Amino acid sequence: MKTIDFEIRTSDLTASNKKLVGYAVRWNSLSEIIWDEFREQFAPGAFSKSLASGSDVRALYEHDYAQLLGRTKSGTLVLTEDNTGLRFELTPPNTQLGNDVLALVERGDISGMSFGFRALKEAWDIAQSPYVRTVTAAELREITVTSMPAYSESDVEIAHRSLFVQHPELRLAGDNRRRWADLAGL
C-alpha cells in the first residue's frame, strides 16, 4: 500500500448559532517556526484546484479522524477562498463532541484552526533566516479545530447573528426595550 505524506498546520477560530466560522489559512501570513527550521506562508489561491476537484474534505477536532465534526460531501463543511484566505463555515453535529467544541470556542478556550495538506508547488527563500517556504498549490485534506495553531492569524468563532454585532451603533447604555419596540414597528 502506497502512503502519501501530508503536512499539518494550524490557525484561529470562533462560534454562533451552532455554527463555527473563520479562516483556516490567511494568505501571505507567516507561520510560527516549523521544526526549528523555517517559516511558511500560503499564496492566494493555493487551494483553488483542490477545492474545484470536489474532493471530500473533513473537519476534525485536534487532527483526529475519529472526532469528525463535518465534511464537504455532506454540506456540513463549506470551504471558500476569498481575498483574505481559506474561509470555512462548519455546522458541528448535535453530539457530545460537537456541543463540547462549540462550548470551548464560545468560552474562548479554543480559538485556533489547523489544516492538513499536501504541497504540490512551493518556492523557498533561503536568503533569510529562518528560511521561508511559500506554498503556491496544495491539496487540502482536512481542517481542524485546535488549541495549538501554527498560524497565529487563523481563527474560528461562533457565527454572530446579533443585531448589535451587525449594527454596533444601535447599542444603548440603558434600557433597550424602546429600541426593540421601534425595530419591531410597535
Image: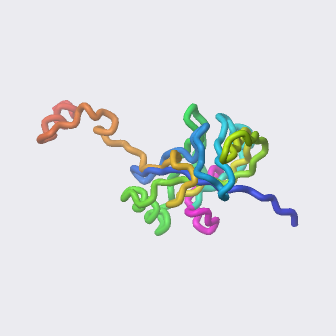
Count of marks, rendered view? 0
Q: Where residue 90 sits in the image (x, y, percent)?
A: 52, 51
Q: Does the segment drawn in magenta span residue 168? A: no
* Residue at the image point whose x is 70% and y is 44% from the top: 133
Q: What range of the chain is rendered magenta?
A: 61-73
* Residue at the image point whose x is 68% and y is 41% from the top: 128
Q: Where residue 163 sits in the image (x, y, percent)?
A: 30, 38
* Residue at the image point whose x is 63% and y is 50% from the top: 72
Residue 1 location, quadrant: bottom right
Q: Nearer the viewer, residue 156 or 66?
A: 156
Left or right of 54 on screen, residue 91? left
Q: Where residue 55 sits in the image (x, y, percent)?
A: 72, 48
Residue 76 at least partly seen: no
Q: Where residue 186 sits in the image (x, y, percent)?
A: 16, 32
Q: In this view, does 103 lie above or below 80?
A: below
Residue 132 location, quadrant: top right
Left or right of 186 on screen, residue 55? right
* Residue at the image point whose x is 55% and y is 35% from the top: 84
SS assignment for the magenta stretch, majority: strand
